[in-house]
């Protein structure tokens, strides 16, 4: 099959055709399970699910149930709530395992993303004089950059020598697989950790995670991933790929609300090893004896052994509501629709270029299927800001990145082929004027 299906002739740039694709989309009814923001009374074209996913209509009820149980039971809700709070977090591994490709004992939901990056580096970045370097992305998300540099400093190392940033070559927008492997072998026996985002937040590029893990392990380094832009967006097989650890936020593709709780993966070989060093708190302690309040920490022999505090139930109720929808739709169906939506978007953008005298849009996201998720980053070669302003006026919610990039993410759970068609139509109309 043609990898660059976006160039395929079978698609049509018409509203009828987009509607036909929607009617034949097995997931098209899921859109109705979400609140689509209205602009001037009209449904917006919401393309920023990579930044904050939309609210499921069931979320309110799940949160209200917990508020009711709190009102009814007070502290007894820990045992007598409809979903007892004591074990509330234990529902998540089952719901997350197919989303990230993990075993249940490798998963825990706790804290927030940047906090978890630190928690995991505490266990997996233990530099020595010989082995102290971390390989990361050059244009990593700022929070990750700060976290990495501060960890390096905490251990008395110098970020300018210990942090190895890999950037795209001049004139390119993505990082080649080879550049990452070359950096791994160059720094080989000085390398402690490879920690990158599985999907680059700027370009939308998906990295070859399996090869990166293999490369890191071959030189004796740990390998972890920030899955903020990957969880719920691309196919993940964290256990099989032998990823050492990973964490993600659940307010982007996982639709669990602003500042929602984060997810953590720790590979079984470490999760079950209670001798792995970590920061400790009472919620990570052996459940049988937790309330004996013993002095000595006895960690749970799963990823739960990394928990510090008792669970934020209200935030978790929103997470539960969102994951129920993922479970119903199923990751395979979502991934299939995602490919088709982005392929249709590539087709529409290529049509815009074809129909104008000179190229307007350079798609910097790799178009090869396994190298992108649903985010598409468009470098606007002319009229960028003007087009973006017009999109805003016409109720398209997209994201602008300096100097000239529009990022959009048609999300398979609630975006439609019609959204993609109308998006293209607005750009074409702006160019005609
Ligand atoms: C969204 C995002 C964050 C945000 O971090 P929080 O701790 O959730 O505020 C961090 N890193 C990456 C790569 C992100 O995409």
Image (cartoon, grey):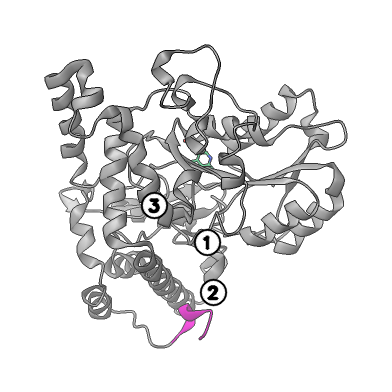
Q: Which residue is mark 1?
A: 382
Residue drawn at the location 51% of the way across and 86% of the way down: 1
Magenta stretch bounds: 1-8
As helix, strand or loop, the secondary structure at mark 1 comes to loop
Task: Work out which quarter of the rendered image holds the C terminus and state it.
Answer: bottom left
Q: Which mark is residue 113?
A: none
Secondary structure predominantly adopted by residues drawn in magenta: loop
The residue positioned 48% from the left and 27% from the top of the image is 284
User: Label 3 to label 2, Cα distance in Å?
Assistant: 24 Å
Q: Are marks 1 and 2 in contact (CB under 8 Å)?
A: yes
Q: Is residue 65 above or below residue 155?
A: below
Q: Nearer the viewer, residue 310 or 263?
A: 310
Rendered image quadrant of residue 363 = bottom right
Which tag, 3 or 2, sits closer to the chain's start?
2
Q: Is residue 169 visible?
A: no
Report whether residue 19 is seen: yes
Crowding at dot 1, Cα within 10 Å, few <14 / some 14-19 / many 20+, comes out as some
175 over 20 or under it: above or below: above
Of residues 432 and 68, the one drawn nearer to the viewer in this rendering: 68
Camera-near label (3 vs 1) is 3
User: How many labels were placed on the picture?
Assistant: 3
Residue labelled with disc 3: 398
In the rendered image, residue 4 lying in the magenta stretch gets the answer yes
From the top left corner, tell me how far across and down residue 368 is, in percent. 56, 72
Residue receiving disc 2:
358
Q: Earlier in the sequence, mark 3 or mark 1?
A: 1
Q: CA distance from mark 3 to mark 1?
A: 18 Å
Q: Does the CB distance between marks 3 and 2 fall below 8 Å?
A: no
Does dot 3 land on a helix, a strand or a loop?
loop
């Amino acid at each position: 099959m043609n990898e660059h299906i976006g160039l395929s002739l079978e698609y049509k740039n018409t509203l009828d055709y987009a509607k036909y694709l929607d009617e034949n989309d097995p997931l098209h009814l899921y859109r109705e399970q979400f609140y689509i923001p209205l602009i001037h009374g009209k449904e917006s074209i919401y393309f920023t699910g990579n930044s904050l996913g939309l609210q499921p209509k069931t979320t309110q009820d799940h949160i209200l149930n917990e508020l009711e149980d709190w009102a009814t039971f007070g502290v007894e809700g820990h045992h007598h709530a409809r979903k007892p709070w004591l074990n509330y977090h234990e529902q998540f591994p089952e719901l997350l395992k197919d989303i990230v490709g993990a075993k249940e004992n490798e998963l825990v939901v706790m804290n927030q993303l940047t906090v978890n990056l630190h928690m995991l580096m505490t266990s997996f970045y233990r530099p020595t004089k010989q082995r102290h370097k971390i390989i990361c992305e050059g244009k990593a998300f700022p929070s990750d950059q700060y976290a990495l540099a501060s960890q390096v400093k905490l251990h008395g190392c110098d970020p300018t020598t210990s942090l190895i940033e890999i950037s795209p070559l001049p004139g390119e927008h993505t990082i080649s697989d080879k550049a990452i492997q070359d950096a791994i072998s160059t720094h080989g026996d000085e390398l402690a950790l490879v920690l990158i985002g599985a999907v680059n937040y700027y370009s939308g590029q998906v990295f070859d995670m399996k090869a990166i893990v293999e490369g890191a392990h071959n030189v004796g380094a740990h390998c972890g991933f920030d899955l903020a832009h990957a969880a719920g967006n691309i196919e993940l097989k964290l256990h099989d790929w032998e990823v050492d650890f990973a964490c993600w936020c659940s307010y982007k593709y996982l639709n669990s609300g602003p500042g929602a709780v984060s997810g953590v993966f720790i590979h079984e070989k470490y999760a079950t090893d209670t001798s792995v060093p970590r920061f400790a708190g009472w919620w990570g302690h052996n459940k049988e004896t937790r309330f004996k309040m013993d002095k000595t920490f006895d960690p749970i022999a799963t990823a739960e052994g990394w928990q510090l505090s008792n669970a934020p139930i209200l935030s978790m109720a929103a997470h539960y509501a969102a994951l129920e929808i993922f479970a119903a739709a199923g990751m395979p169906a979502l991934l299939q629709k995602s490919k088709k939506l982005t392929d249709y978007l590539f087709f529409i953008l290529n049509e815009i270029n074809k129909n104008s005298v000179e190229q307007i849009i350079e798609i910097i996201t790799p178009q090869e299927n396994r190298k992108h998720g649903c985010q598409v980053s468009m470098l606007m070669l002319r009229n960028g800001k003007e087009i973006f302003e017009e999109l805003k006026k016409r109720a398209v919610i997209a994201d602008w990145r300096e100097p000239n990039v529009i990022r959009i993410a048609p999300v398979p759970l609630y975006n439609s082929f019609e959204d993609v068609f109308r998006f293209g139509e607005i750009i074409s109309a702006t160019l005609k004027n």
